[in-house]
Structure formats: C-alpha cells, structure tokens
Image (cartoon, rainbow, N blue to C red):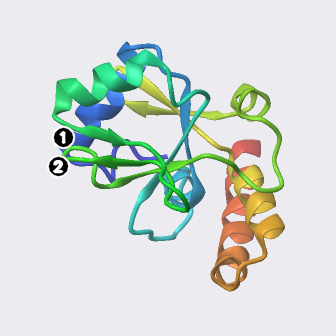
Amino acid sequence: MAENLIFDEKEVAFLKELIRNGVPFMIVGLSAAALQGAPVVTQDVDLWFEDLEHPGIAAALKKVGGSYIPPVMQNPPMLAGDAVNLFDIVVHMHGLGSFREEARDAIQVPLGRFKLKVLGLERIIDSKRALGREKDKIVMNVLSDALIAIRSGQKK
C-alpha cells in the first residue's frame, strides 16, 4: 500500500483534522480499493461517518475552509470548499453491517504520522455485489484479482 497517492495537501489537511478531532470515519468505495493497491480509478473519495453530527466534522471543516451542506429532499449531504471537493459523504453501505461493525475490521493506511481507516477490499466487493449496478459489475473482476494478489502477498 503506497502512502498518499490520491490526495493533495489540502485534502490531507482535512483528513488529518478529522483524525485530530476524533471523528469516527472511514474511506470506502473504489478510492479505498485504490489505497489498498487495486488498479482502479475514481473521480471522488467516499467518506463514511459514524455520526454526521459529530462536532469534530464541523471543526475540521472550519480549519480547512470547508462547509457541510445538509441533505435536502433527495439530495444527499455534501461537503463544499477547495479542501473537500474530492470527498463525497456516504450514508449507507449496501450489503454491509453498521459503521461500527465494519470499522472493527477496517484496514489502517498510513497518512504521514496518522492512520486512515479504510474499508477492506473484501467488504468493498461485498457491497458492490449487493448493489449490483452495472458500473460495479464491470470493476468486480479487477477487485477480485486485486484481493487475490493482496492475500498471496500477505502469505509470503
């Protein structure tokens, strides 16, 4: 797992502020797969928070000049600002347990002297399988092959 291949300095600052403020969160989706070495690309980084009302989120956003936009009708909650434009908020992961259940087995990825919680590749695959979207089916073989490669590398 390579350190910090997908974040610029502003984004790293936001993630570090979340960690400093004790916000329970993890990176999920294809960005989480990429952080574990899967050869995939994505346009955003999905953040799954245990509690969107955690005061540390507002503190982290304030520190980096970002804003929280609450959900309105069919629009999900969002983040706005230069330091947080890359991030999307995920409120539910299909086919998985609760945030707390999934966080117990999350992978730790280095981010400087900090560690990011990242949903494990096997659970990412489970969630994409449960969703069953066409775009998820297309990437499933790549994710499965990456999981096999990661597991075989861990056995050595």
Q: Can residue 86 be seen in the rendering of this structure?
A: yes
The reply to whether the C-beta atoms of the residues labelled 2 and 1 are less than 8 Å apart is: yes
Which label sits on residue 148? none
What's the residue type where badge 1 is placed?
A: Lys
Say which quadrant the C terminus sits in.
top right
Tell me which amino acid carries mark 2: Asp
Q: Which residue is mark 2?
A: 82
In the visual, does 152 lie left or right of 108?
A: right
- 71 vs 118, left or right, is left
Is disc 1 placed on a helix, strand or loop?
helix
Residue 10 - label: 1
Instruction: Give neighbour class at mark 1: few <14, some 14-19, many 20+ (Cα, 10 Å).
Output: some
Give the residue drawn at x 18%, y 41%.
Answer: 9
Q: Position of residue 47 (x, y in %)?
A: 50, 44
Q: Nearer the viewer, mark 2 or mark 1?
A: 2
Q: Dot 2: few (<14), some (14–19), or many (≥20) neighbours within 10 Å? A: few
Camera-side residue of 129 and 156: 129
SS class, disc 2: loop
At horizontal 20% and vertical 47% (from top left) the residue drawn is: 81
x and y percentages locating residue 71 in the rendered image = 48, 49
Q: N-terminal of the two: label 2 or label 1?
A: 1
Image location of residue 65, percent across then percent down: 16, 34
152 with respect to 77 (left or right): right
Looking at the picture, how far across and down is residue 143, in whole percent? 67, 68
- How many labels were placed on the picture? 2
Lateral position of residue 88 relative to residue 121, left or right:
left
Classify 67 as above or below 29. above
Mark 2–mark 1 distance (CA, rounded to whole Å): 8 Å
Q: Residue at x 81, y 59 (%)?
A: 126
Furthest residue toward front: 73
Q: Is 63 rendered above or below residue 31?
A: above
Please report the residue visible at 21 percent of the width from the left and 48 percent of the height from the top.
8
